[in-house]
Amino acid sequence: MTNAPQTSAATNNGPALAVCWSCKGPVAWGGLFCDTCKAVQPPVPLDHFARLGLKRDFDIKVPVLDQLYFGFQRQLHPDRFAAAAPKAKQISQSQAVAFNEAYETLKDPLTRAAYLLDLLGEKVEGEGAHTIADEELLMDQLERREALMEAENPAEVEAIARQAKLDAEAALSALASNFASGDKIAAKRGYLRLKYLVKLGEEARARRARLTLAR
Amino acid sequence: MLLQIHEPGETPLPHETEKGLAVGIDLGTTNSVVAFARDQKAEIVRDARGVGLVPSVVAYFDEGDPLVGELARRELLDNPEVVVSSIKRLMGRGPDELAKLGDALPYELGPPADGGMARLKIGARLLTPVEISADILRAVKQRAEIALGRAVDRAVVTVPAYFDDAARTATRDAARLAGLEVLRLVAEPTAAALAYGLDSQAEGLYAVYDLGGGTFDFSLLRLERGVFQVLATGGDAALGGDDFDNAIAQRFMAERGDKLDRDHVKQALVTARLAKECLTDRDDWDGFLDLGEAESAHKLTRAEFEKLIAPLVERTIQIAAATLEDAGVAPDQLGGVVLVGGSTRVPLVRKRVAEFFGKPPLTDIDPDEVVAVGAALQAEALTAGSDTLLLDVLPLSLGLETMGGIVEKVVERNTPIPVSRAQEFTTYQDGQNAMALHVVQGEREMVDQCRSLARFELDGIPPMVAGAARIRVTFAVDADGLLTVSAKEATTGVESRIEVKPSYGLTEDEMAAMLRASIDNAQDDMERRLLTEARVEARRAINAVQSALGVDSDLLSADERKRIDETIDMVERAMSATDRAAIQGAAEELEHRTKIFAERRMDRGIRKALAGRAVADIGG
């Protein structure tokens, strides 16, 4: 999957030039600022990886992602345009929105996996999502849910939460290697498994909070 | 102690065309504070006695201007019926919500304003919380103007992180009414972190525990080289030091065997507050409660006080724990915990915070002033430019009501802002041409357990069979946390202009009337703002053309160049006068007369790009 084409002006056959809204001169397609008059440019349609200057790859180092994101927001956040012309302010806001969305999606491995699978033509969330039957996952899910519902004290719930966390970590590294080897179907299974473990962890925490309060 | 900041030769009087100063204002439940920053050093604006806190208390007499601050607070004992305090707790709340408070609300409710905003009956007046807050803001603005010797017309105003859209809008409207342009609404905990972060260049994860008079906010932030990234926020918009006072006052009233009476409650609260403050340094308090007819003696030990407030303090710790857990952060991972708000002076609060986080909290900056310091630093950053950046999040989820009163979340809480999210809905009847939308904010699943923000009708949907229309509703939240909703029918592209009427807001007419009535002559103020905007836009247009001339002026003949230069001069001349329409007209003319130039520049750009691509193709 690392061979997936990068979305960029060059390979997209899209127009490589755009008109700067401020000085009306030429500006590179997808450029953040006009080289001539320095005006901020509106966001162009790009996938989240390309927007942040990342390779389209599941294996992202979050500190690297943070740094890239901070770097863009330092230039584009509306606070940087507090004294600018109204149109520039508005454009900076739409840029900040685009970078926030890209960052939010890629920061969390679960949403990153769903997004990447979607890009690879294996939609897993929302309308038109392909579902797959995973008997093993289903059985496991039923057993753990039952155990959680029957747990009557915070310590038992804590044990279930801890196990879910450990298993989620294992599922995450399995998912990463599925993506690395380009096995989309395995990645899809891996995604669903991770999603369910994360959800179980959340439910366990909610139940623990309820049990603690009840005491 | 007055802050004296004059440049040599600077006129101390506000000049007609000169921009005023930008300050930071902490509009608090109990006290408000204003600060001003220069060169990343903020100073609290103090009165002649060195006091920085302005009690957020307003006294309205039948005649004359309202009294604000300490003078108003003194009226509490003699004329409680004309005094308003803790108005912040009512910001953005609807009349029905206030009615539910019953005796806990020490004011009589009047008929609501046309826009649905609650109004209080204070003496002979009917006042919205927005107007009362505006009176407080006007007073702190004047205080700053006297101290700084310059007009103040812009401000960063802080709000509790947990403030919903209605409360934020109300705060912004109050500032507008007081003649202040809001540069940014900043969450109080974020402002506090900013105050600490700039001083110490701190890096890593920090928590801000902010227990004010009326609100509790808990925020988790990451600090890194000038970036303040809010990771998660939690809190309770109705939990604070006022509740401590209330607990004590209830005890006093019970000891007297008195029935709760509005004016008596106010006086009991004043005494309760004195007792609370006394117990910060001492182990016991005794005093008298004088309610006119009968004086009663009361005693309170610190241990008794702590027992009264322990459940309230535990609630704050539970909220902190849940917020950390949501973010997947353990208490011992934190680099520090910043204390904000006067209520964090209470020893039990400090003790429980230290126990929970396993380290003593940071208290270097006065917890009553730290928020204003941060606000002032941000005001400077926004006007003079800086490397600091505040990346904030949406405090409460936003959603729409769907069938059966269930909330469909459109933007989840703790999403970084600004953010824009769209959701698609469809019609459920053949030929349906309108759809009612109800926007709510909150975490609960049912509509009636969330805050109602706005209701509006989307009409003009083209007739289609049920389920065929695709209505895309877009929620856009700006960096201030303020929401705009728009809707569009996707299959036909018919866009319906919709006006979002806040459920408990002010109508534009009401706002305009209040502005007209305000002593600051807001009509002029508005015109001045539009003039400034026109000048900023004209300056941008000139800069853009000049930049282009710097690169491509060889595309113009001498005559053409002369014509453009003349037009620029014309815009400059218009800008030095005060006719807004003339400035806009001149700027448009400049755009018009540089059209050919722009076309030639585009042609050149395209030729260059093609040449570059041809070389690349040969090379590849």
Image: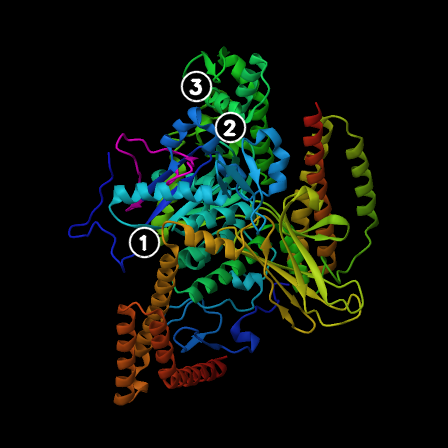
Instruction: Name the amino acid type tagged 3.
Output: Thr
Residue under pointer 1: B384
Q: Nearer the viewer, mark 3 or mark 2?
A: 2
**B103 and B424: which one is in front?**
B103
- The residue segment tinted magenta is B37-66
How far across and how far down the image is residue B293, in percent? 49, 15
- Does residue B319 sit above or below B567 in this rendering? above
Instruction: Name the amino acid type tagged 1.
Output: Ala
- Is disc 2 on the same chain as disc 3? yes
Q: Earlier in the sequence, mark 3 or mark 1?
A: 3
| Residue at the spot 78% in from the left edge and 38% down from the top edge | A144
Residue under pointer 2: B242
Element type at marker 2? helix
Residue B190, quarter of picture: top left
Element type at marker 3? helix
Q: Nearer the viewer, mark 3 or mark 1?
A: 3
Q: Residues within 10 Å of mark 2 (few under 14, many from 20)?
A: many
Residue A206, quarter of picture: top right
Instruction: Name the amino acid type tagged 2.
Output: Asp
Element type at marker 1? helix
In reply to whether residue B52 is colored magenta, the answer given is: yes
What distance separates the C-alpha of mark 3 from that of mark 2? 15 Å
- Does residue A169 sit above or below B581 in this rendering? above
Query: Is residue A83 visible to the viewer in this orientation of the structure?
Result: no
| Residue at the spot 38% in from the left edge and 36% down from the top edge | B68
| Residue at the spot 64% in from the left edge and 61% down from the top edge | B473
- Does residue B249 sit above or below A89 in this rendering? above
Residue under pointer 3: B280
- Is disc 1 on the same chain as disc 2? yes
